[in-house]
Image: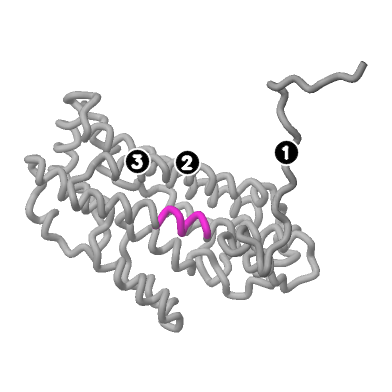
Amino acid sequence: MSQQAHPYEAAEPETPHLDFAGTTPYEDYVRADLLTHLQHTLSDDPGEMVFLVTTQVMELWFTVLVHEWETAAKALRSDDVPTAIAALKRSVRELEALNASWTPLAGLTPAQFNSYRAALGEGSGFQSAMYRRMEFLLGEKSASMLVPHRGAHRAHAELEKALHEPSLYDEVLRLLARRGHAIPDEVLDRDVAQRHEPVAAVEQVWTEIYSGDQDGELVRLGEALTDVAELVWRWRNDHLVATRRAMGSKTGTGGSAGVAWLEKRARKNVFPELWTARSYV
């Protein structure tokens, strides 16, 4: 007696559409063929491919983070705090993915790194235009960091624009002022092309906010910013540790001070008053 399929049993999946006139819709959207043919190693060492792809992946995450923080800054200008918080929360997950990018490189020995280090020439991560835009959005402004990009017109123009626009944190402080908090005029009217420096009055504002309703919108905004700041700090420290392990205290590629420069960067807090205010709550 033959068995009959029960009506509730899943049917066999249909064969996917395989025949396309040109490239696949997936390729048209993702541009995978372009992405997977951008790797041009300059040494015979097989480890260079890992280094190159990991660095390119980092650049893509920088691009996503710039998008998220620009979205948050725009929302804050419009007093749309929920949209800003949503963008910041997405960026936290993206920062976690970015930080995990160090894993393939974290265990490099000096000999392994040296096997293809010469291929970098004077190349160095601090020359990344997208990373610089990311730092500018965090308030780490520096006009001198435009100099390496004078020969790349689009990158230079985008960085110059970002230099003279309010950072994400500038927009946060302007929002707090519009909400009635005592942000000093010298903070609100400052030259936004300069690096943000801690201000005691801003620390006091955050102290008052954090001493209030813990479910309030501004506390939730502050916590989203703190999550971002913590993961940026972890990124800098992971960079420091990976570099120290791979090359010790030697001069960095591109003529930087290497580990000494990274140690200085790792000591800096992003959104500093959000951290110091916690001592007074």
Q: Which residue reaches farthest right?
A: 1
Give the quarter of the image for residue 133: bottom left
Tag nearer the camera, 2 or 1? 1
Q: Which residue is mark 2?
A: 93
- Is label 2 in contact with label 3 (beta carbons under 8 Å)? no
Q: Which disc number belongs to residue 86?
A: 3
Q: Main secondary structure of the magenta part?
A: helix
Residue drawn at x 62%, y 75% as measured from the top left: 121
Tag nearer the camera, 1 or 3? 1
Q: Amino acid at mark 1?
A: Pro
Residue 199 percent across, percent down from the top left: 18, 47
Q: Is residue 40 visible?
A: yes
| Figure check: 143 above or below 278 | below
- In 3D space, how far apart are the residues under numbered discs 2 and 1 (Cα atoms)? 34 Å
Q: Amino acid at mark 3?
A: Ala
Q: Which residue reaches farthest bottom?
A: 151
For marks 1 and 3 on the same chain, the one whose residue lies earlier in the sequence: 1
Give SS at disc 2.
Answer: helix
Q: Which disc number belongs to residue 13?
A: 1
Residue drawn at x 47%, y 52% as measured from the top left: 263
Q: Is residue 117 visible?
A: no
On the rendered structure, is 156 left or right of 191?
right
- In 3D space, how far apart are the residues under numbered discs 1 and 3 (Cα atoms)? 37 Å
- Is label 2 in contact with label 1 (beta carbons under 8 Å)? no
